[in-house]
Image (cartoon, rainbow, N blue to C red):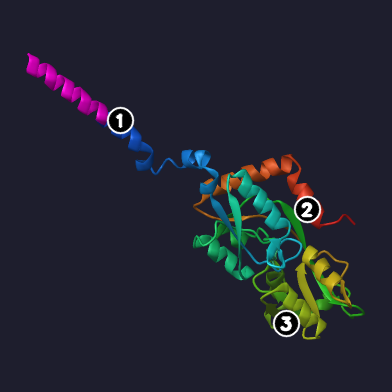
Amino acid sequence: MKFTKILALVLAVVMCFGILAACGTKPAEDPANDANETADAPANDAKVFKMGTNAAFPPYEYKEGEEFVGIDVEIATAIAEKLGGTLEVVDMEFDSIITAVNQGEVDFGMAGMTVTDERLLEVNFSSSYATGVQSVIVAEGSEIASLDDLAGKKIGVQLGTTGDIYATDDYGAEFVTQYGKGADAVIALKGGDVDAVIIDNEPAKAFVAENEGLTILDTDYAVEDYAIAVKKDNTDLLDDINAALEALTADGTIDSIIAKYIKAE
Ligand code: GLN
């Protein structure tokens, strides 16, 4: 009798330890418990969200000294904070951003990037946070005064952008010269290597303000929606970004960031 009592006690103790051990190790053994980890993560564990961009596209992303600034950088910082993390900007060619997103080198791409049907085959896009318009920059006094006048002229664009795609479709690849950066296309225009540059309206205004002797044609070539590109299977992040964008729109953060960089005319 005594022996069975001792045995029962030993068994009970062993079971208790078993349960304690199981409870104690559960979180570590359960990698699916991501949601808890994010919610309870201490600040130094906060996720670093990597944003792939091309920081030569003022006022959306550009460098002030060593610092990345601009509308996209500030909106992305606000999104990262809303999601309990911080932002790291990864600067690259515009043309490489979607590949970097899909290879997981960055968490998302944000670069005044237009939502297009072709890009939607490769990535998902968040809700749109801004609108862009393709614009035409020419030298002051140029004989090019309308879109029709561009036929047969040399057009400079930024490689892989919608300006590049439209110019190639509408005027022919032989008339289009692709530059890695919009600023380089503008330098080519100043030097007379091209007759016009097709680029988004806000960067166009910034480039014209920085360079004497250039002007923007009074024509809206194409109106576009800017959104954030996320890898197709990363729907959790897409949902989180959309929720953050919604909150930041509702509380006026997005409007005030845009107003800081784009002065009403
Ligand atoms: N909005 C244009 C596009 O998506 C240009 C973007 C850019 O040059 N950063 O192609």
Can you identify the residue that label 2 sits on?
Answer: 258
Is residue 239 found inside the magenta-colored segment of the image? no
Is 136 or 70 nearer to us in this picture?
70
Residue at (12, 22) in percent of width and height? 7
Say which residue label 3 marks. 175
State the image coordinates of residue 174 (x, y, percent, origin top left). 69, 83
Looking at the image, the residue that sits furthest to the right is: 141
> Which quadrant of the figure shows ligand 1?
bottom right
Quarter of image, res 162? bottom right
Q: Secondary structure at mark 3?
A: helix
The alpha-carbon separation of the residues under discs 3 and 2 comes to: 34 Å
Mark found first going from the N terminus, 3 or 2: 3
Part of the protein shown in magenta: 1-17
What's the magenta bit mostly, secondary-structure-wise?
Answer: helix
Q: Residue at x 55, y 48 (%)?
A: 237
Residue 20 numbered tag: 1
In-image side of 92 versus 65 (left or right) = left
Residue 60 image point, x, y percent = 73, 60
Instruction: Nearest to the eye among marks 1 and 3: give it.
Output: 1
211 and 132: which is toward the camera = 211
Q: Position of residue 156 (x, y in %)?
A: 74, 78
Residue 48: give x, y in percent of width and height.
Answer: 55, 53
Q: Residues within 10 Å of mark 1 (few under 14, many from 20)?
A: few
Gap in angstroms between the C-alphas marked 1 and 3: 73 Å
Q: Is residue 113 visible?
A: yes
| Residue 86: assigned label | none
Q: Amino acid at mark 3?
A: Phe
Q: Nearer the viewer, mark 2 or mark 1?
A: 1
Q: Nearer the viewer, residue 134 or 39?
A: 39
Circles 3 and 2: CB atoms closer than 8 Å: no
Residue depicted at x 51% and y 51%: 234
| SS of the residue under disc 2 | helix
